[in-house]
Amino acid sequence: MANLFTYFELGRIEGGCDEAGRGCLSGPVVAAAVILNPDKPISALNDSKQVNEKNRLVLRDQIMNEASAYAIGIVTHEEIDEINILNASFLAMHRAIDQLTIKPEFLLIDGNRFKPYPTIPHACIIKGDAKYQSIAAASILAKTKRDEIMDSLHEQYPIYNWKKNKGYPTIEHREAIAAVGPSPHHRMTFRLLADKSQLDLFD
């Protein structure tokens, strides 16, 4: 397990932010913001991509029980199509930060770009979910929440096998789109098929 940093700078309230689902063809983009409790460390924290599903769920419960504050922000596939995925990712993070019961003094953002949140300075950290505990915690909450949403949608649209691929552009997912067309939950501004124009979906 990685040895993640606890703080970007000691002596202040820091909130970590990350999102899940940015590269998917369907469903929302989900972000989380987490302020960890320094008196209740979670030693197993790591980037959600490096943790299997069973352990992610264990960590999710630990984060929810032990963190000083956490919140989830969701931006729908319709909103993604309206404002583009980059802006949607920023908006999801802002919505998560809006709901924090404790106001952070500084934000740690996973990635290299962010729309500044009013009155709170931030730092963008490339691969931050593998470097800072609060970002790793946010990645866990964002990933598990989005997976729950896609698992629920899978029950309505099993043809796309979202329970397995979670909406990512796997060969199987794209083959299903080619066979039956897009669902009401697909992002229509995304390239849904690998080799055909999106217009072909409606022939």
Image (cartoon, rainbow, N blue to C red):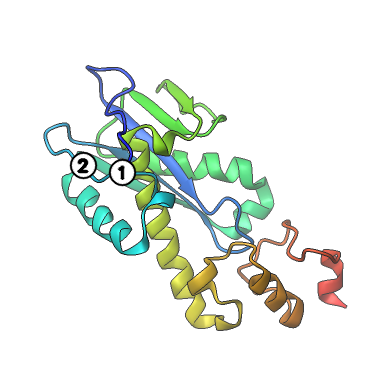
Q: Total of numbered circles in the picture?
A: 2
Left or right of 26 on screen, residue 177: right
- Residue 100, given in percent of the width and then of the height, sits at 30, 40
The label on residue 103 is: none
Q: Quick one: quadrant of the N terminus? A: top left
Q: Is residue 178 above or below residue 187?
A: below
Q: Position of residue 109 (x, y in %)?
A: 45, 32
Q: Which quarter of the figure is the C terminus placed in?
A: bottom right
Q: Which residue is mark 1?
A: 1
Locate residue 143, reporting x and y percent: 42, 55
Q: Amino acid at mark 1?
A: Met
Q: Does any portion of residue 168 appear in the rendered image?
A: yes
Pointer 1 with pointer 2, Cβ within 8 A? yes
| Placement of 1 over or under 29, stated as above or below | above
- Of labels 1 and 2, earlier in sequence is 1
Give the residue displayed 86% in from the left and 64% down from the top. Answer: 197
* Residue toward you, 101 or 201: 201
Residue at figure coordinates x 51%, y 26% from the top left:
116
Q: What residue occupies the far front of the structure in this picture?
A: 1
Q: Which residue is mark 2?
A: 43
As helix, strand or loop, the secondary structure at mark 2 comes to loop
> What type is the residue that disc 2 sits on?
Ser
* Residue 151 position by quadrant: bottom left
